[in-house]
Amino acid sequence: MGEVGKAMGLLISGTLVYYHCVYRNATLLSLFSDVLIVLLCSLAILGLLFRQLNVSVPVDPLKWQISQDTASNIVARLANTVGAAEAVLRVAATGHDKRLFVKVVICLYFLSALGRLIAGVTVAYAGLCMFCLCMLCQNSQFLGNCVLKRANGEILEQEAHIDT
């Protein structure tokens, strides 16, 4: 899947989560349970359909497992992220780095004020939309450069044929 597909998938998923949480006034726990119910029912229907059609499933979902290395990698990344955030907050709280302290206080104050004005889900959705737009713009610039190079190449080839 290309960058455009990833951006569109993120935007569609984010829009569905935003709709579920804001317009339906539901929680993320409600969304999570709804998604699990839909997946469970879909898998049950597919299982019954495959059994009726005598279709053998090549992969047994009960045997799906992740490797020990993958699990360790996931936990290590999570621990590194939490540890880095904790270290930054600890240094800022002790006051040893005044600039970092001021930056943290300003960021926290800004987020607090923003949270009083706008719901957190709306801020997260706006951030997701901006992230997807950045991904699309980067990809469109790349595609635009390729199109321009092709167009310029074709023009140069046409001029070379006209000169000869």
Image (tube, rainbow, N blue to C red):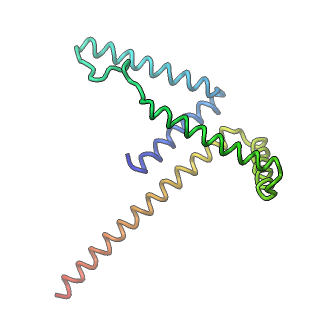
Q: Is residue 90 left or right of residue 49?
A: right
Front-lying residue, 72 or 64: 72
Q: Is residue 132 left or right of residue 124?
A: left
Front-lying residue, 140 or 99: 99
Kindly identify the residue that appears in the image at 76 percent across and 55 percent down. 100
| Number of numbered discs visible in the structure rendering | 0
Quadrant where the C terminus sits is: bottom left
Front-lying residue, 57 or 89: 89
Quadrant where the N terminus sits is: top left
Which residue extends farthest bottom? 163
Kindly identify the residue that appears in the image at 71 percent across and 42 percent down. 86
- Above or below 22: residue 161: below
| Residue 150 % position (x, y) | 31, 69
- Above or below 6: residue 61: above
| Residue 143 % position (x, y) | 39, 61
| Residue 58 % position (x, y) | 26, 23
Which residue extends farthest left? 164
Q: Is residue 102 left or right of residue 74?
A: right
Kindly identify the residue that appears in the image at 36 percent across and 70 percent down. 148
- Above or below 36: residue 4: below
Front-lying residue, 52 or 88: 88
Q: Quadrant of residue 40?
A: top left
Kindly identify the residue that appears in the image at 38 percent across and 24 percent down. 64
| Residue 66 % position (x, y) | 42, 29
